[in-house]
């Protein structure tokens, strides 16, 4: 009887141990499932795998947020920096004037060219010589015809008639000369217009403008400093649109990934390693490199529209991300 009770206790103890082992195994197997508000845990950095949790698709870990545009705006002319309107950390709009390189001489040149253009325009619109040449030709032609009639009546000598005919022909040449002078005056006017545009372009070259909505990352020049053509004035970065870059194994997934495919992107914006806080973005795969790197992977990236968090941007370059590429069966 004693042995029978001991056997029953052994069976119960063994069953309990088995349940504990199964529970621990189940916990280990489900530990990688996505938890709301957390970034899906990556495999090795840059690796791609089939996602076993939502969303479906090819999972690309180890992605990094990068600048879409990061530009050093240079001076396009030599001269003193007479105006500088930005500071580091300032937000600027496309077309905003960042600075001016001494425009005094360029403005005087522009005014001179405008006045020369006015003079050339007056000459191009002057038809007096042409109208005078036409009137003179009519008189000379009538006079030559009169002398021809007198010569037919033997009332005028032959050479006098020929002289009047030559004067009429000369008057016709004066008309053609007047037409040529008008064309030359119009051409001169067009040259002056081009010179005015060139002078105006010189002023625009001395005006440093923002090419896109941007954030002033660095300022290199100082107000009043002499700058040279090509020397950087400020460094600006685009923050309203960024790109998320990653690498996908070409041998395993190269034929399944194409430009234009829908992607879901999860970007870590805070939290801890154990409980990261992420933001989700829907995007389109914009780029796949044709060249493979040393790990036999394609470089890929997708653009995302950034979001504001108060007065600051939510997403910053350098943040880690995971990308899911949707694959159509």
Image (cartoon, rainbow, N blue to C red):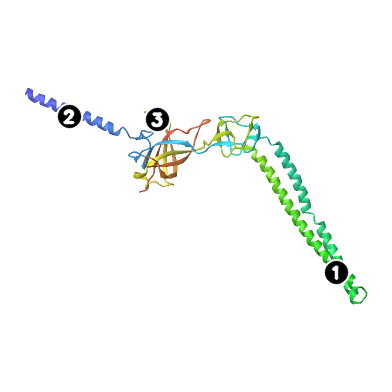
For the residue labelled by badge 2, is the local secondary structure a helix, a strand or a loop? helix
Q: Disc number at residue 165?
A: 1
Could you tell me residue 50's position as x and y percent?
A: 33, 41
Residue 55 appears in view? no
Image-based side of 26 in relation to 293, left or right: left
Residue at label 2?
A: 15
- Which circle's residue, 1 or 2, is located before the other in the chain? 2
In this view, which residue lies farthest toward the right? 155
User: Which residue is pictured at 12% across the width and 26% down the height?
Assistant: 8
Quadrant of the rendered image containing residue 289: top left
Which circle's residue, 3 or 1, is located before the other in the chain? 1
**Mark 3 or 1, closer to the camera:** 1
What whole-number distance in Å separates the C-alpha atoms at marks 3 and 1? Answer: 103 Å
Q: Quadrant of the N terminus?
A: top left
User: Is 155 placed above or below 72 here?
Assistant: below
Residue sitting at 79 percent across and 60 percent down?
A: 177
From the top left corner, tell me how far across and down residue 31 is, in percent. 31, 32
Q: Depth check: give the residue in front, 160 or 1.
A: 160
Q: Nearer the viewer, mark 1 or mark 2?
A: 1
Task: Determine whether label 1 and label 2 are within 8 Å by CB.
Answer: no
Q: Nearer the viewer, residue 9 or 194?
A: 194
What residue is shown with label 3?
276
Tell me the element at label 1: helix
Q: Quadrant of residue 283?
A: top left
Q: Residues within 10 Å of mark 3 (few under 14, many from 20)?
A: some
Q: Position of residue 87 (x, y in %)?
A: 59, 29
Of label 2 and label 3, which has the lower sequence position? 2
Nearer mark to the viewer, of 2 and 3: 3
């Amino acid at each position: 009887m004693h042995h029978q009770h001991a056997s029953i206790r052994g069976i119960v103890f063994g069953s309990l141990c088995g349940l504990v082992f199964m529970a621990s195994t189940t916990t280990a197997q489900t530990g990688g499932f996505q938890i709301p508000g957390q970034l899906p845990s990556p495999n090795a950095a840059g690796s791609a795998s089939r996602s076993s949790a939502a969303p479906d698709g090819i999972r690309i870990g180890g992605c990094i947020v990068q600048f879409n545009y990061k530009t050093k705006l240079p001076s396009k002319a030599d001269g003193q920096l007479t105006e500088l309107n930005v500071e580091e950390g300032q937000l600027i709009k496309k077309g905003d004037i960042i600075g001016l390189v001494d425009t005094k001489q360029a403005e005087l040149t522009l005014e001179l060219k405008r006045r020369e253009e006015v003079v050339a325009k007056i000459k191009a619109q002057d038809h007096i010589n042409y109208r005078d040449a036409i009137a003179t030709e009519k008189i000379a032609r009538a006079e030559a015809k009169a002398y021809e009639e007198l010569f037919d009546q033997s009332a005028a000598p032959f050479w006098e008639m020929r002289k009047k005919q030559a004067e009429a022909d000369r008057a016709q040449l004066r008309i053609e000369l007047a037409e040529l002078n008008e064309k030359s005056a119009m051409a001169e006017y067009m040259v002056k217009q081009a010179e005015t545009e060139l002078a105006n372009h010189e002023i625009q070259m001395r005006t440093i403008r923002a090419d896109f909505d941007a954030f002033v990352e660095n300022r290199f020049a100082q107000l009043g400093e002499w700058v040279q053509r090509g020397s950087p004035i400020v460094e600006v970065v685009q923050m309203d649109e960024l790109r998320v870059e990653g690498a996908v194994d070409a041998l395993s997934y190269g034929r399944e990934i194409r430009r234009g495919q829908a992607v879901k992107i999860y970007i870590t914006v805070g939290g801890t390693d154990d409980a990261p806080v992420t933001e989700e973005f829907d995007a389109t795969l914009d780029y796949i490199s044709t060249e493979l790197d040393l790990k036999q992977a394609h470089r890929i990236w997708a653009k995302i529209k950034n979001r504001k968090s108060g007065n600051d941007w939510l997403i910053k370059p350098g943040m880690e991300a995971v990308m899911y590429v949707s694959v159509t069966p």
